[in-house]
Amino acid sequence: MYTQALNDPSSKIATVEEGEEKLNDYFMERISADEKIEPNDWMPASYRKTLIRQISQHAHSEVIGMLPEGNWITRAPTLRRKATLLAKVQDEGGHGLYLYAAAETLGISREEMQQQLLDGKARYSSIFNYPTLTWADIGSIGWLVDGAAIMNQIPLCRCSFGPYARAMVRVCKEESFHQRQGYEILLALCKGSAEQKAMAQESLDRWWWPSIMMFGPHDANSTHSDQSMAWKIKRISNDDLRQKFIDATVPQAHHLGLEIPDPDLKFNEKTGHWDFGKIDWDEFKRVLAGNGPCNRERMEARTKAHNDGDWVRKAALAHAAKQAARKSTRKAA
Ligand code: FAQ
């Protein structure tokens, strides 16, 4: 549903005989005109490669992102909380599925993407390498992590590549529900006992900076941004999205009666934005290099799930082969 090609028959598409340079000119004309690029359209090899990298990284993040919250399904404090968390974690699996399907339209198989993740050749978001130590962390993930994900993904609904943009529309709607359920968990804790409020504050203290890092390096250090902006894959830069997130989130923290763990956080009357302190990029680099608090645990869990699911994949393939054989025998008869 999200991956079908919806080419506009009236759009100008060059033919291979016209040569690479001409093809690229037409491609950039289409990008300037805000046309959607579809899987069977001509596209520069580097555009395809960038999209495969970003979409597969995004898909892996959704799937690995199920682990920190999955950790609390059996320990949710009420049946309502448990049912909601279960649905949320299931949604993340669904997001992974739409995204793998969108990436497959670019000519890479799901098996190959899985293997890249298991071999440590593909990244997933830094944020999922942090532990969920208390129930308040489930609130913080919804409020901050889903909140940051929405901020980053709303502009992706206007991404130049059709299947990715369309997948993002539904993902954003679901993330918006996730964000509210997280905020509501924290609201309940902040209105509760002193211990519950302290638990919420302690959780915010741990999750604030990693959430800020989710937006990626500063624009000056972002290797892919310039090209991705020119291709309209990215519409808003890492730093601008980070600032938008901080501006939206600080008042929400105040409403909860919580303090953001940043002594340099200050509203700037001149710019109308919240100025904030220095990000610890050494920590970000450590996590990206595989040395965050839970990198090993996450990859072990993912590898185990993949290996445990081997018989399911084999059984599904055997079933499909049997069905196909029956169909061809029926046709021949
Ligand atoms: N973590 O040049 P840039 C979610 C890497 S979904 C790890 O700025 P780019 C839902 C980057 O890959 C969260 N690596 O790169 C949920 C590159 O490395 P490479 C995931 C990062 O691509 C909620 C290098 O640094 N969302 O949370 C990170 O232009 C709750 C240089 O960076 C997406 O993936 C990072 N945070 O911009 C699920 C959204 N940041 O490949 C469960 C789509 C940067 O050269 C529970 N992706 N790197 O080796 C994007 O928008 C972009 O890819 C960025 C990075 C903005 C993440």
Image (cartoon, rainbow, N blue to C red):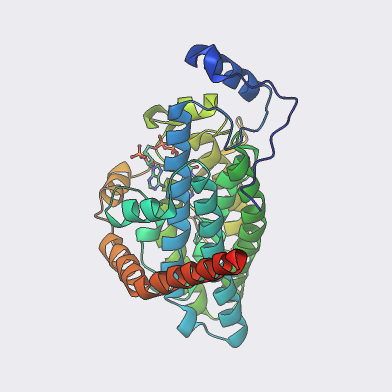
Q: Residue at x 41, y 62 (%)?
A: 64
Q: Is residue 130 left or right of residue 196?
A: left
Q: Is residue 49 left or right of residue 171?
A: left
Q: Is residue 162 left or right of residue 263?
A: right
Which percent across, then down, holds residue 204? 46, 62
Which percent across, then down, holds residue 111? 39, 55
Q: Residue at x 42, y 74 (%)?
A: 315
Task: Pick the quarter of the image with the C terminus.
Answer: bottom right
The reply to whether residue 148 is visible in this rendering is no
Which percent across, then down, holds residue 168? 61, 49
Q: Is residue 208 left or right of residue 297?
A: right
For residue 311, what is the image quadrant? bottom left
Q: Is residue 222 above or below residue 164?
A: above
Q: Nearer the viewer, residue 157 or 113?
A: 113
Q: Quadrant of ligand 1?
A: top left
Hey, which residue is sitting farthest right in the picture? 10
Hey, which residue is sitting farthest bottom in the picture? 79
Q: Is residue 293 above or below residue 116?
A: below
Q: Residue at x 44, y 48 (%)?
A: 56
Q: Nearer the viewer, residue 314 or 191?
A: 314
The reply to whether residue 258 is visible in this rendering is yes
Q: Residue at x 71, y 24 (%)?
A: 11
Q: Nearer the viewer, residue 210 or 167?
A: 167
For residue 296, what is the image quadrant? bottom left
Which percent across, then down, holds residue 206? 39, 61
Q: How many marks?
A: 0
Q: Nearer the viewer, residue 267 or 116?
A: 116
